[in-house]
């Protein structure tokens, strides 16, 4: 049985009709075409699908879409404003923190959630904040550098 | 200073913005009107006869559009070295997870339901999972036709038979005499596990036929041209009717040498006349993927009291699983490097690539070498400890020098390894830290040598009407940054800025041939093709401009977007002007072309038996130093610092080079301490990122990546590859550091807390 839900995504209101068992990740990617949010494990183990829900990072593969009724969701597509990159995006680009890029959207959003709460984190805090976002390409060195540079 | 303006600079990757904004499209993100979902039915048994496949029930399920089995495909065998594999299992299955049927349906759920309705009758056969047992004459045969399989290398004289897929042997000097002449003989057995590449984008392909009968395949692959070739051969479709495109690729680490799903997508798309997508779940990717070969390495080494190595006998057994895949190639590779980068007058190496009913192993960064590197570098420290020598001193004493020979007869071209050894130990304060003995803390080092480059590549360059440049090159950027590095090479050679270049890559219709992103070959081999194309264009521009400026061609230079006379800045013509003139007045539009072939020579297979390659085009070197802290209560090892000095010839883009080293180290640390694909009678019991532990940001130490530049004469601007070496010395460096900390030697990877505790218990019990 389908249900109608209202979600605010990247500052815009959406009304979508969905089946109750579908995840937020599926709805973002398949119904709304917001494919910047990635799926790499589908089980909450890798962080690739991280989005920000009402200011907190969540794994969208573990969130049922119906749970996001009335919530504010920020995905990677909503981070740049008026054609200008978010400073974290710039830092990731400039520091070489992006290789294959599959972890990047989730990584940047986890970092953003951290910096929104703790604008000047220690390196340990940065590493803890992204501990649930796995990256197989970079060894995290340049990712941590980029986040630290932005949180200085 | 180098005087270069574009190369040697830390520049962001050209695709970084699109990846940071979520705009970059990967194969998993593609969707087409009318697209169907494909799913693959996989064998439930490790070794069984297929008696019957009944698809009638599944065909009746609403939403199912096509079902295919071995009956629907040509009976053609394929393989990288040995043609032993078919798209679907025929007559029997040889491993759990081998494809037996495939379905296309209107959605994923329906496709999954359909799989459950396909009835396959099996008759189980005796299965074998241990390569040593598989080599026994009484072992059940996995490939009855092993001696009849065709090979991909015309000159290859394979050693094979029974469950032996391939083997290599070489004997230099006289090892038995060498052992007799030694003061000490060390015998150790090392074991390394199956490990999984863990690229984040799972294997995914989409295929779509058009009305002319041409199929376009979008695939998460590192080698689109290889894919086009294989699809053409196994499906009997001419290559001009197959276009393979690699969109952004979410990592490969060796595991995407072939796009596993593409044959099924093409077949299902042809049958349904609709686009078909197959995306593996993570669990399925563990099962269907081609992880690193588990390996057992027996190493016997004779040494003089003063530390000189006299003789070494290495025996390597690689478990390739049910099919050869890249096994014979990477066994030969591991075999070549197995004695270590040391002067040893008497060497015998035997390497065996063995079939079992385990999951098929394949290509993973480091190609057969992390296994012997762990062995020979661990044993170096065992020797150093016994002789009471500093491990650094022992290595310096025995290091091969320029002009020395590898066992395959190839000359060591430089003393790059020594440079990395001295640089890494200096930066890591080896001597200082080795002296200050701290409780539960240790420091360890390891060296490695390895190859860079394989095969050939090609490139087109065109001059646009406004003087900007279009480049077409087959290389696939899987995240490592090849597209940017290649653009840097081109810009440098043509004297233009990066902004003036646009790159088209990894599309078999619009770019010229390339082998693929394997073997640390992009910057080195493709870079040479790109540079050659740039020189070709430049020569045409020089001819034109020299005529106009009434100057000699040899006095011309390309710089700052102009072509002019060296030393006379006022006598120069902008590229835009040459572009327009070439189009409307003289000569015709300018196109540069470049092809490059690796510079190698044959290996003497009378001496180096069963070898299937030529010599290696270039060699790369590295030394890493690890500092660890071990909790003796829990056995947990924490890596505190990792210093990695790598010779890359010349760093075209130092930021990307560091990225390759750092990423390599993280995979190396997983190999050392946490990663192992667990198999129980051929079944993977931990096929997920919860139980299969790759390193997180919290686990990673501080990495000090140091670039060593020993000019490579055959490389573009002296550059060679850096893609694979990052992970090679890591595990032995960590194992050696653990020994330094605790005095226990662990010879089986990964070094988990239980192994540390057990070793400590055994040590105190004595």
Image (spheres, helix red, strand yellow):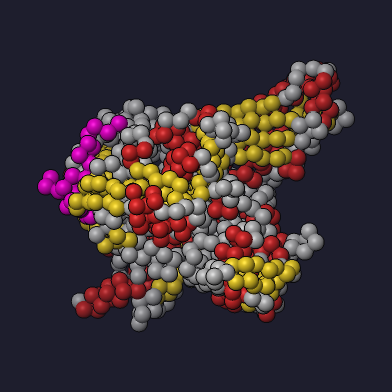
The span shown in magenta is B125-150
Q: Position of residue B523 (x, y in %)?
A: 57, 41
* Residue B490 can be seen in this image: yes
Q: Residue at x 27, y 74 (%)?
A: B758
Q: Residue furthest bottom?
A: B633
Q: Nearer the viewer, residue B230 or B194?
A: B230
Q: Residue furthest left?
A: B138
Q: Residue at x 70, y 68 (%)?
A: A14
Q: Residue at x 54, y 33 (%)?
A: B214
Q: Nearer the viewer, residue B124 or B227?
A: B124
Residue B702 in the image: above or below residue B408: below
Q: Nearer the viewer, residue B86 or A16?
A: A16
In terms of image quadrants, where is residue B634? bottom left
In terms of image quadrants, where is residue B193? bottom left
Our reading of the magenta stretch's main secondary structure is loop
Q: In screen coordinates, is B672 left or right of A114?
A: left
Of the 4 image quadrants, the one containing the N terminus of chain B is top right
Q: Position of residue B325 (x, y in %)?
A: 35, 43
Label count reads 0
Q: Residue at x 80, y 61 (%)?
A: A82
* Residue B4 can be seen in this image: no
Residue B748 in the image: above or below residue B162: below
Q: Residue furthest right?
A: B570
Q: Position of residue B192 (x, y in %)?
A: 32, 58
Residue B763 in the image: above or below residue B220: below
Of the 4 image quadrants, the one containing the C terminus of chain B is bottom left
Residue B154 in the image: above or below residue B350: above
Q: Position of residue B723 (x, y in %)?
A: 51, 49
Asked whether residue B579 is drawn in magenta, I would say no
């Amino acid at each position: 049985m389908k249900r109608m839900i209202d979600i605010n995504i990247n500052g815009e209101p959406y009304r979508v009709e969905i089946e109750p068992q579908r995840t937020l990740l599926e709805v973002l990617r398949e119904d709304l075409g917001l494919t910047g949010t990635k799926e790499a494990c589908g089980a909450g183990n890798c962080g690739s699908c991280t989005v920000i829900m009402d200011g907190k990072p969540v794994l969208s593969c573990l969130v049922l879409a119906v749970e996001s009724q009335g919530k504010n969701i920020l995905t990677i597509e909503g981070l740049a404003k008026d054609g200008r990159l978010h400073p974290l995006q710039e830092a990731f680009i400039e520091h070489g923190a992006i290789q294959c890029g599959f972890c990047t959207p989730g990584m940047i959003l986890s970092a953003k959630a951290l910096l929104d709460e703790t604008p000047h984190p220690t390196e340990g805090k940065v590493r803890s904040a992204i501990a649930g976002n796995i990256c197989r390409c970079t060894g995290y060195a340049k990712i941590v550098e980029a986040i630290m540079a932005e949180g200085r | 200073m180098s005087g270069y303006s574009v190369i040697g600079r830390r520049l962001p990757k050209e695709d970084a913005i699109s990846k940071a904004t979520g705009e970059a499209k990967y194969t998993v993100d593609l969707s087409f009107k009318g697209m169907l979902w494909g799913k693959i039915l996989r064998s439930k048994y490790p070794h069984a006869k297929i008696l019957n496949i009944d698809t009638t029930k599944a065909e009746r399920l609403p939403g199912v559009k096509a079902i295919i089995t071995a009956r629907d495909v040509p009976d053609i065998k394929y393989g990288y070295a040995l043609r032993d594999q078919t798209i679907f299992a025929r007559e029997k299955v040889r491993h759990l997870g081998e494809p037996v049927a495939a379905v296309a349906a209107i959605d994923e759920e329906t496709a999954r339901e359909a799989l459950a309705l396909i009835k396959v009758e099996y008759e189980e056969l005796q299965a074998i999972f241990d390569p040593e047992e598989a080599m026994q004459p009484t072992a059940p045969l996995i490939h009855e036709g092993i001696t009849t399989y065709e090979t991909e290398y015309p000159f290859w004289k394979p050693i094979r038979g029974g469950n032996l897929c391939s083997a290599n042997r070489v004997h230099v000097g006289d090892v038995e005499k060498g052992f007799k002449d030694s003061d000490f003989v060390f015998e150790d057995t090392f074991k390394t596990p199956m490990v999984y590449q863990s690229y984040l984008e799972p294997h995914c392909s989409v295929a779509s036929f058009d009305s002319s009968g041409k199929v376009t395949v979008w695939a998460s692959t590192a080698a689109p041209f290889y894919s086009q070739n294989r699809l053409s051969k196994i499906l009997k479709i001419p290559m001009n009717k197959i276009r393979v495109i690699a969109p952004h690729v979410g990592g490969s680490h060796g595991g995407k040498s072939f796009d596993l799903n593409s044959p099924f997508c093409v077949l299902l798309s042809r049958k349904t006349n609709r686009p078909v997508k197959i995306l593996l779940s993570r669990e399925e990717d563990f099962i269907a993927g081609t992880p690193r070969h588990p390996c057992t390495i027996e190493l016997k080494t004779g040494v003089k009291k003063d530390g000189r190595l006299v003789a070494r006998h290495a025996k390597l057994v690689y478990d390739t699983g049910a099919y050869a895949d890249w096994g014979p190639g990477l066994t030969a590779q591991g075999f070549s490097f197995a004695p270590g980068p040391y002067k040893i007058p008497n060497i015998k190496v035997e390497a065996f690539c063995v079939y079992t009913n385990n999951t098929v192993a394949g290509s993973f960064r480091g190609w057969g070498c992390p296994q012997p590197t762990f062995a020979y570098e661990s044993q170096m420290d065992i020797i150093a400890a016994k002789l009471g020598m500093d491990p650094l001193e022992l290595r310096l004493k025995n290091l091969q020098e320029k002009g020395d020979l590898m066992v395959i007869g190839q000359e060591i071209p430089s003393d790059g390894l020594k440079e990395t050894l001295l640089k890494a130990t200096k930066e890591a304060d080896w001597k200082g830290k080795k002296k200050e003995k701290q409780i539960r803390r240790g420091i360890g080092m390891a060296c490695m040598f390895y190859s860079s480059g394989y095969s050939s590549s090609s490139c087109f360059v065109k001059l646009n009407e406004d003087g900007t440049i279009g480049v077409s090159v087959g290389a696939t950027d899987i995240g490592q940054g090849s597209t940017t590095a290649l653009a840097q090479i081109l810009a440098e050679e043509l004297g233009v800025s990066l902004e003036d270049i646009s790159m088209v890559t990894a599309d078999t219709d619009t770019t010229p041939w390339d082998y693929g992103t394997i073997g640390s070959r992009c910057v080195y081999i493709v870079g040479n093709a790109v540079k050659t194309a740039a020189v070709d264009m430049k020569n045409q521009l020089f001819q034109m401009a020299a005529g106009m400026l009434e100057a000699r061609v040899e006095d011309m230079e390309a710089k700052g977007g102009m072509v002019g006379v060296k030393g006379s800045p006022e006598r120069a013509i902008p590229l835009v002007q040459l572009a327009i003139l070439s189009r409307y007045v003289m000569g015709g539009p300018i196109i540069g072309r470049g092809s490059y072939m690796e510079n190698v020579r044959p290996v003497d297979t009378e001496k180096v038996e069963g070898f299937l390659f030529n010599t290696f085009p270039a060699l790369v070197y590295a030394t890493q130093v690890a500092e660890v802290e071990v909790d003796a209560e829990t056995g947990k090892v924490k890596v505190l610092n990792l210093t990695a000095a790598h010779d890359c010839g010349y760093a075209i883009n130092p930021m990307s080079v560091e990225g390759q080293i750092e990423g390599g180290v993280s995979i190396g640390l997983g190999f050392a301490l946490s990663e192992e694909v667990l198999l129980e009678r051929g079944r993977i019991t931990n096929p997920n990122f919860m139980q299969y532990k790759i390193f997180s940001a919290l686990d990673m130490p501080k990495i000090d990546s140091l670039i060593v530049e020993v000019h490579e004469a055959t490389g573009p601007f002296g550059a060679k590859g850096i893609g694979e070496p990052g992970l090679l010395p890591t595990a032995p460096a960590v194992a050696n550091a653990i020994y330094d900390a605790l005095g226990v030697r662990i010879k089986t990877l990964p070094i988990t807390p239980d192994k540390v505790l057990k070793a400590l218990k055994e040590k105190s019990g004595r």
